[in-house]
Image (tube, rainbow, N blue to C red):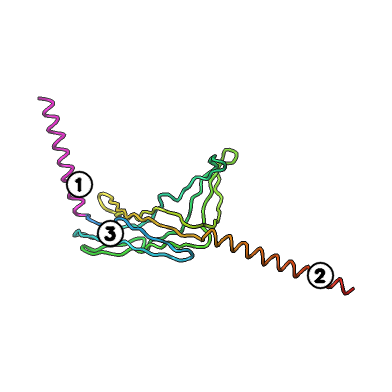
Amino acid sequence: MQVKAVFKKVSFITIFSLIFLSSVYAQTGVGIFPAKIEIEAPFLKNTFTDVTIFNPSQRELKLKVEVYCRNCERDVKFFENKIGTLTYDLDVKAFPETITLQPMMEQRIMVKFPNPLLLKGIFKTTIFGREVGIPVYLFHFDEERFDYRVVASTVSTQIEISLVSGISLKFLGMSKIYFMLAILVLLLIASFVYYIYNKKIYEKYEKF
């Protein structure tokens, strides 16, 4: 009998909690679209995409919008031994960062992905038992893939609700072949300038 009484109490509490949570979610209903985006960011250009956040509820909602990278931290190895990590900072921004949605309204959030010549990153390693972070700027070649999440979180509600839209980013860099050709051309130009410089000096001394 005691077991049945306990079971009834647990069932009642569970059902009450589900009803309470359902009512709260109904009051703060909010959605995001699309749930998944795949984009390509060309080299040396700014790429934009957008997500739409909508409020189908009957109350005003305030939301904070943030962008997170899921795989921007990479291991750095030297002869197969990990010597630290490199965290890319692509300066991805969402705007506006805070929004207020009226009942039955929606708003587009723009996300900007800059693709500069040099990528900024933080190299973290351990020196004499202490972790240090060193800013670095790197060329990037061919193609890199980054996974981002656009997270919209409710502010000042009974239960915080977070909505997520995933962005799969194909980040295009410079071609390794073109880079090597450019280096070769620069070396040829430097050699030619050095040759002309030495030739003028030789001709100058020949006159004496």
Q: Quadrant of residue 178?
A: bottom right
The answer to which image quadrant residue 152 occupies is bottom left
- Most distant residue in the left direction: 1
- Percent across and percent down for residue 97 are 36, 61
Query: In the picture, which quadrant includes the C terminus?
Result: bottom right
Q: Residues within 10 Å of mark 3 (few under 14, many from 20)?
A: some
Q: Nearer the N terminus, badge 2 or badge 1? A: 1
Most distant residue in the right direction? 208
Question: Residue 88: horizontal and vertical position, in percent?
Answer: 48, 53
In terms of secondary structure, what is the magenta stretch mainly?
A: helix
Q: Amino acid at mark 3?
A: Phe
Residue 11 belongs to magenta span: yes
Cα–Cα span, label 2 and label 3: 70 Å
The residue singled out by tag 3 in the image is: 33
Magenta residue span? 1-27
Tag 3's secondary structure? Answer: strand
Q: Residue at x 37, y 60 (%)?
A: 39
Q: Is residue 89 left or right of residue 61?
A: right
Q: Nearer the viewer, mark 2 or mark 1?
A: 2
Question: Circle 1 sits on which residue?
Answer: 21
**12 sits left or right of 53 in the view:** left
**Of callouts 2 and 3, which one flags the residue occurring earlier in the amino acid sequence?**
3
Residue type at the position of mark 2: Ile
Residue identifier under label 2:
201
Q: Is residue 21 magenta?
A: yes
Instruction: Please state which of residues 110 and 155 is positioned toward the viewer in this rendering.
Output: 110
Residue lying at the far top in this picture: please name it.
1
Q: Nearer the viewer, residue 25 or 45?
A: 45
Q: Amino acid at mark 1?
A: Leu
Q: Quadrant of residue 105?
A: bottom left
Within 10 Å of the Cα at label 2, are there few (<14), some (14-19), or many (20+) other Cα atoms? few
Q: Which mark is residue 59?
A: none
